Amino acid sequence: EVQLVETGGGLIQPGGSLRLSCAASGFTVSSNYMSWVRQAPGKGLEWVSVIYSGGSTYYADSVKGRFTISRDNSKNTLYLQMNSLRAEDTAVYYCARSKRSWSGKDWFDPWGQGTLVTVSS
Amino acid sequence: DIQMTQSPSSLSASVGDRVTITCRASQSISSYLNWYQQKPGKAPKLLIYAASSLQSGVPSRFSGSGSGTDFTLTISSLQPEDFATYYCQQSYSTLYSFGQGTKLEIK
């Protein structure tokens, strides 16, 4: 079964750092595009970052320079290192695989269950 | 960056109704458009990919259409389990983006 499980969320003070993990099963993280998507309380979905199978990474402007996406191929796990956290980073963070078609189109499936990050003093 | 705009933001409908949700992109995205359903406290679920392809296991009352900048998600006959929030998402750009969501409520 293809599955993603996020861990690492919690309460952190403004300016602090946190690392989220996303353990995959049923497929190989390094062979896929993998993304982080977040959802602030009561708000919509916001794409955060992607890492391509080739290793290229991209970020939303709201997190560029503060967040780093990475993966550990030996552990089949995706990470999101979050530094200089702000109150507006408070959200449920989901990891998701990009399923790609032969034509290059892609979509998020599956998604993890999410992990809550709360940035507050 | 590509902006995605959904309309309406919220919608009240009854079981059995036909419902259409619209998504507009700020530039042409061909058919690089996906639709998701999200229920409270749950992760989003893929419904439609590449504008019009139905994800395996999703009921056939859901359908998607469009290309370029204008897209629609249609539910042909609303069922009680369809009351949720729906999001469109573009995958044309390296920087993905979502619409703001459409909350579908029971009338």
Image (tube, rainbow, N blue to C red):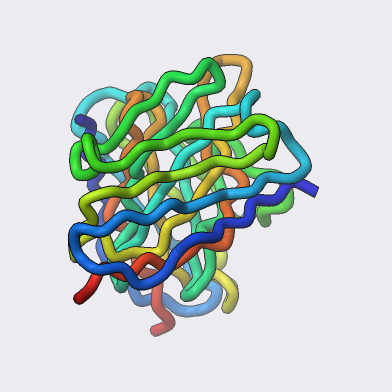
Q: Is residue A42 shown left or right of residue B106?
A: left
Looking at the picture, tell me which residue is in the foreground, B29 or A95. Answer: A95
Looking at the picture, tell me which residue is in the foreground, B22 or A75. Answer: A75
- Using the image, determine if residue B42 lies above or below residue B28: below
Residue found at x 34% / y 28%: A58
Image quadrant holding the C terminus of chain B, namely bottom left
Looking at the picture, tell me which residue is in the foreground, A86 or A33. Answer: A86
- Using the image, determine if residue A25 lies above or below residue A121: above
Q: Is residue A84 shown left or right of residue B106?
A: left
Instruction: Estimate the x, y position of residue A86 in percent, counting from the top left.
Output: 19, 59
Instruction: Estimate the x, y position of residue A32 in percent, counting from the top left.
Output: 60, 27
Q: Point out the residue furthest to the right here.
A: A1
Q: Is residue A114 shown left or right of residue B22?
A: right
- Using the image, determine if residue A30 lies above or below residue B107: above
Residue found at x 19% / y 44%: A62
Looking at the picture, tell me which residue is in the foreground, B23 or A13. Answer: A13
Residue B76 visible? The answer is no
Instruction: Estimate the x, y position of residue A69 in percent, counting from the top left.
Output: 42, 36
